[in-house]
Amino acid sequence: MLPSNWFCRPVPNFSANAPSLMYYSKDVRIFGHASIRVMQRRIGIFAGTFNPVHDGHLAFALAATNTCHLDEVVFLPELEPRRKSGVTSLKLRAKQLDEALKAYSFFRTVALNDRHFTVAHTLPQLQQLFPDENMTLLVGSDVALHLKNWADIKDLLLICNLAIGLRSQHEDSKVRQAMEELQTDVGSPVRYKLIKASHADVASSQFK
C-alpha cells in the first residue's frame, strides 16, 4: 500500500502504441520549507531466457503494462539461465528481442553482466538504473509458486511489486494461497496482481 502522502495521477498519452500512463507522486519537503511533487514512473522488469522471445512473452508484458499501469517494461535476457541447457548466445537472443520489441515504444532490452537474475546482485544494479522509479517484477505463476525458496526474497519484495502471469495449469486460488504463505514467511506485505494473458501456454521449446 502506498503511504498516505502519495496519490495517483493519470497523465494523458496520445501515442497509439503506448499504454495509459499512471504516475505516482508524493510531497517532498526541501530543507523544512515548501514541498515539491516528485513523480515516479512505473517500470516493469521481465527477466528470462527468451530463447527465443515469442507471442506469450509479449502478450504477458502487454497485459501487465495495462493492468499494472506500467510506463515501460525492461526485458532482461539472462546469460546463463538456471536449469536450462542448449541456450543460444546472449548476443543473438538480445538481437531477437530488440527486433521483436521494435513495434512497442514502451518495451526495451537491457543486458546486465549477471549470469542469471539474483536478488543480491541484480536488484542493486536495477536500483542504480532506476533510482526514482517504482519497479514491478514480471514472473510466471510457475516461478511465483517457488518464490519462497529464493535467497533474499524479502529484500526483493520490499522494493518490487509482482505481476504474476497465470499459466493455464495453475488455479488462481493456488497462486493466491502461495502469496499468502509467502507474506507470512517474510513478515511483510506481498504486493501483486494476477495477470491473465493470451498465449499463456506458449513455450520457447516449441520453436526449437
Image (cartoon, grey):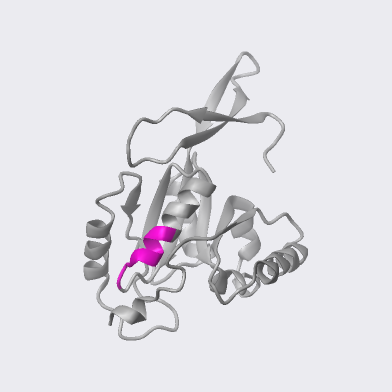
Q: Is residue 140 above or below residue 65?
A: below
Measuring from the top left, give residue 110's x and y in whole percent: 33, 56
In this rendering, position of residue 152 left or right of residue 123: right
Residue 135 versus residue 120: which sits nearer the camera? 135
Q: Quadrant of residue 7?
A: top right
User: Magenta residues, as a range?
Assistant: 52-59
Q: Quadrant of the N terminus?
A: top right
**Picture residue at 51% right of the left edge, 35% below the top:** 22
Specify whether residue 190 is in view.
yes
Return the residue nearer the eye: 183 or 66.
66
Indicate whether 160 appears above or below 152: above
Q: Place residue 3 in its image quadrant.
A: top right
In the image, residue 47 lies at what x, y percent? 43, 63
**Against 176, is 45 above or below?**
above
Closer to the camera in the image, 41 or 121: 41
**Does the magenta portion include 56?**
yes
Residue at (61% x, 19% y) in the render: 31
Locate the C terminus and report the quarter of the image it occupies.
bottom left
Q: Is residue 54 magenta?
A: yes
Residue 10 coordinates in the image, percent (x, y): 52, 30
Residue under the image location 27 percent in, 70 percent down:
90
Image quadrant assignment for residue 152: bottom right
Vertical placement of residue 178 versus 159, above or below: below
Q: Visible in this render: residue 125?
A: no
What secondary structure is the stretch in magenta mostly built from?
helix
As drawn, is 37 to the left or to the right of 85?
Answer: right
